[in-house]
Amino acid sequence: MRTSFPAVSLFRRCWPFLLALVACELGPRFLEVDPAPDTSDPVGPYRVRASMTQDDTVKDVSIFYDVHPPLADGGSPDGGKRMPLGTQRTRMVRLTPGVYEGDIPGQPVGSTVEYRLVATDVLGMKATAPEEPEDRYTLHITAANDGPHLRDAGR
């Protein structure tokens, strides 16, 4: 005769929900992101660094980026927003526990790079930075005489 304990039966029925709760509470989180600054260097690479929680369960940290290239005539056929070439990915490398670093390759002067970071843990839970789906970090590749320090000096 087989004996069943109520607690064991409850655990078996609730296991998927408990796993989801633990994953939500313990999934990866970005603590701090050091984005690549605007630059006049078309060679690159442009370094991005991030620190995370739950490093022992992180399987992958990547940068997903879109490049908006400069137009040859300086104009913009789409009302001021250049269309991206398509999303590209570069994996970040773990430097120390909880600290990751990745490089966006060099881009032509006049380009704008929009990017976000995505971390995935062993359970498939994801964290993004910035957190809001529509937000992105932005990197501008400027002409050598059009750096942020000169552009902002007249304000």
Image (tube, grey):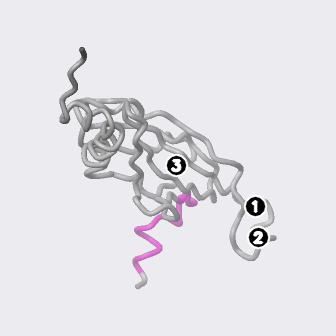
Q: In which quarter of the image is the C terminus?
A: bottom left
Q: Is mark 3 on a helix, strand or loop?
A: loop
- Say above or below: 72 vs 57: below
- Say above or below: 2 vs 52: above
Q: Residues within 10 Å of mark 2 (few under 14, many from 20)?
A: few
Marks 1 and 3 sit apart, C-alpha to C-alpha, by 18 Å
Identify the mark nearer the N-term, 2 or 3.
3
Residue 50, percent from left and from top? 32, 45
Q: Are marks 1 and 2 in contact (CB under 8 Å)?
A: yes
Q: What amino acid does circle 2 point to? A: Ser
Q: What amino acid does circle 1 point to? A: Leu
Seen from the viewer's position, the closer of residues 144 and 33 is 33
Q: To which residue does mark 3 refer?
A: 41
Relative to 80, is 51 on the left or the right?
left
Marks 2 and 3 sit apart, C-alpha to C-alpha, by 23 Å
Q: What amino acid does circle 3 point to? A: Asp
Which residue is depicted at the point 50% across and 61% down?
Answer: 133
Identify the mark nearer the N-term, 1 or 3.
3
- Say above or below: 46 vs 6: below
Q: Which of marks 1 and 3 is in front?
A: 1
Q: Nearer the viewer, mark 2 or mark 3?
A: 2
Residue interval drawn in magenta: 140-153
Q: Is residue 111 magenta?
A: no
Q: Residues within 10 Å of mark 3 (few under 14, many from 20)?
A: some
Per the rendering, the mark at residue 76 is 2
Q: To which residue does mark 1 refer?
A: 71
Which residue is depicted at the point 51% across and 42% down?
Answer: 104
Q: Place residue 105 in its image quadrant.
A: top right
Relative to 152, is 76 on the left or the right?
right
Marks 1 and 2 sit apart, C-alpha to C-alpha, by 7 Å
